[in-house]
Image: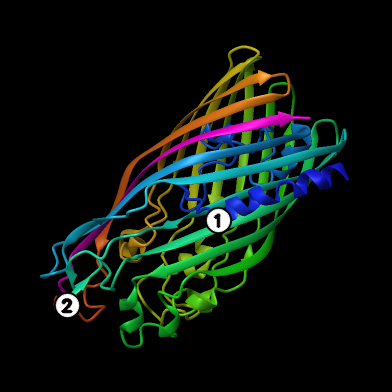
């Protein structure tokens, strides 16, 4: 009963996370889950530092002990889009207005005995959150935004996952884990009337834009393995299935497969090495399969109507992510961390126009972190990540695709972003 009471005590915090857009950096996945991992560039697959195994590697939870972890990130993405070399009225640059977000994280783990644990991790994905002003673009019908719609332009996608997790030590050195991934997501789009008003461009023009928020739910699983080969080396592996979500009915004329927007499958491999008693060096490889979700991975150049099974998407390709980090236990109370995260850019130059709405172009992430053990059973952890500006440029889809006064002269477009993430977490061991 003790676990149940502590689990339901997290409900208000889960509600807070559900109302917060969790923006991300490896496409729309976070560069790491849990503040300790974030301070090491996101490395976590072969480590058991906290109660975020449901987001990283479920098998790690049985090594983490009974504990509660609560954290908050200040996330500041600076995004912009520009069109140049076009006909009259289509050139210009706009900045996305929202640059400050606060993103919570929650994890709890309970040891049922020495070999079995039960816990829950609550985490989020996002990154498709933009708000561009109307601007002074003229697409043939007066003032418009950069995508030739009226009013503010942008999208807001939030993905929340609650991951109940069980982990079991098969032997003294090896464990297996399973997380049930219970997904909830919320989405809205505004200002993309050009996609709805262009004849035959959408299969359902009434359900493309400006319909307010819509929500979807679904489920998947994550499985994991962690092995402590000896006192110096640990290895880990985790696989997450695609989270099958219900459809966004209000946007079935925008997303492929009548509004379907599943969460991509992904997997990771990791190794951690202790070259000295107070040092840990770890590395992860992660693969995110964005192309497996039609609304994300389908090319944006139309071969069918928006909303159709093979309709346009954001054109995101599968990406590889490489993470490396180090931790130094300076003394009994202070641990210092550093890390680097290198991810592929999922956006091709041919898909820039659609990705003005979702410029997930980041590749390089530099992290620093610390943990201060302020009392016997509690600790404070901080992490800072800086992602330098990255851009992608390509020919505009307005080159003959939409009816404008500057048909066939829409030039090139560039999307760009830079990021700062600063977080603080509190952990309590029981």
Q: Which residue is mark 2?
A: 407
User: Residue 336: horizontal and vertical position, in percent?
Assistant: 54, 21
Residue 388 among those drawn in magenta: no
From the image, which quarter does the C terminus lie in?
top right
User: Residue 133: horizontal and vertical position, in percent?
Assistant: 28, 61
Residue 36 position by quadrant: top right
Residue pictured at 30% horizontal, 77% vertical: 194
Front residue of this view, candidates 329 and 196:
196
- Identify the mark at residue 19; answer none if there is no mark: 1
For label 1, the crowd category at 10 Å Cα-Cα, with few meaning under 14, some 14 to 19 and many 20 or more, is few
For label 2, the crowd category at 10 Å Cα-Cα, with few meaning under 14, some 14 to 19 and many 20 or more, is some
Front residue of this view, candidates 218 and 398:
218
Residue pictured at 71% horizontal, 36% vertical: 68
Residue 426 among those drawn in magenta: yes
Q: Which residues are magenta?
A: 407-430
- Compared with 412, 172 (above or below) is above
Front residue of this view, candidates 328 and 69:
69
Front residue of this view, candidates 349 and 37:
37
CA–CA distance in space, label 2 to label 1: 41 Å
Which one is in front in this view, the residue at disc 2 or the one at disc 1? 1
Give the prevailing secondary structure in the magenta stretch: strand
Q: Give the side of residue 406 with respect to residue 69, left or right.
A: left
- Identify the mark at residue 190; answer none if there is no mark: none
Tell me if I can see residue 299 in this picture.
no
Residue 378 position by quadrant: top right
Mark 2 or 1, nearer chain start = 1
Q: Give the side of residue 24 with respect to residue 418, left or right.
A: right
């Amino acid at each position: 009963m003790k676990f149940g009471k502590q689990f339901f005590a997290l409900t208000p915090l889960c509600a807070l996370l559900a109302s917060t857009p969790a923006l991300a950096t490896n496409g729309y996945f976070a560069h790491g889950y849990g503040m300790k991992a974030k301070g090491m560039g996101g490395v976590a697959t072969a480590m058991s530092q906290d109660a975020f195994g449901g987001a990283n590697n479920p098998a790690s939870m049985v090594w983490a002990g009974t504990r509660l972890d609560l954290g908050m990130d200040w996330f500041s993405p600076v995004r912009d889009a520009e069109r140049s070399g076009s006909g009259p009225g289509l050139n210009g640059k706009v900045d996305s207005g929202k640059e400050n977000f606060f993103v919570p994280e929650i994890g709890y783990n309970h040891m049922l005995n020495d070999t079995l644990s039960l816990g829950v991790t609550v985490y989020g994905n996002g990154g498709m959150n933009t708000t561009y002003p109307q601007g002074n673009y003229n697409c043939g019908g007066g003032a418009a935004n950069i995508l030739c719609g009226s009013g503010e332009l942008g999208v807001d996608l939030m993905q929340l996952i609650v991951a109940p997790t069980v982990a079991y030590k098969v032997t003294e050195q090896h464990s297996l884990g399973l997380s049930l991934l219970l997904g909830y997501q919320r989405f809205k789009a505004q200002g993309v009337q050009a996609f709805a008003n262009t004849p035959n461009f959408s299969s359902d023009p009434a359900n493309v834009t400006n319909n307010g928020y819509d929500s979807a739910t679904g489920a998947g699983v994550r499985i994991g393995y962690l092995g402590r080969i000896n006192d110096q080396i640990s290895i880990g592996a985790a696989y997450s299935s695609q989270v099958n979500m219900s459809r966004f009915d209000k946007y079935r004329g925008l997303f492929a497969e009548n509004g379907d927007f599943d969460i991509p499958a992904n997997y990771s491999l990791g190794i951690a090495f202790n070259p000295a008693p107070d040092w840990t060096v770890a590395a992860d490889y992660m693969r995110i399969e964005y192309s497996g979700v039609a609304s994300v991975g389908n090319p944006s150049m139309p071969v069918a109507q928006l909303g159709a099974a093979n309709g346009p998407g954001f054109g995101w390709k599968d990406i590889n992510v490489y993470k490396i980090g180090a931790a130094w236990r300076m003394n009994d109370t202070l641990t210092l961390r550093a890390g680097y995260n290198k991810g592929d850019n999922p956006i091709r130059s041919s898909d820039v126009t659609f990705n003005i709405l979702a410029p997930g172009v980041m590749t390089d992430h530099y992290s620093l972190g610390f943990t201060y053990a302020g009392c016997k059973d509690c600790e404070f952890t901080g992490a800072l990540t800086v992602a330098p500006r990255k851009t992608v440029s390509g020919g505009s889809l307005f080159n003959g695709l939409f009816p404008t006064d500057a048909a066939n002269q829409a030039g090139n477009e560039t999307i760009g972003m830079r990021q700062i993430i600063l977080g603080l977490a509190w952990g309590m061991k029981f």
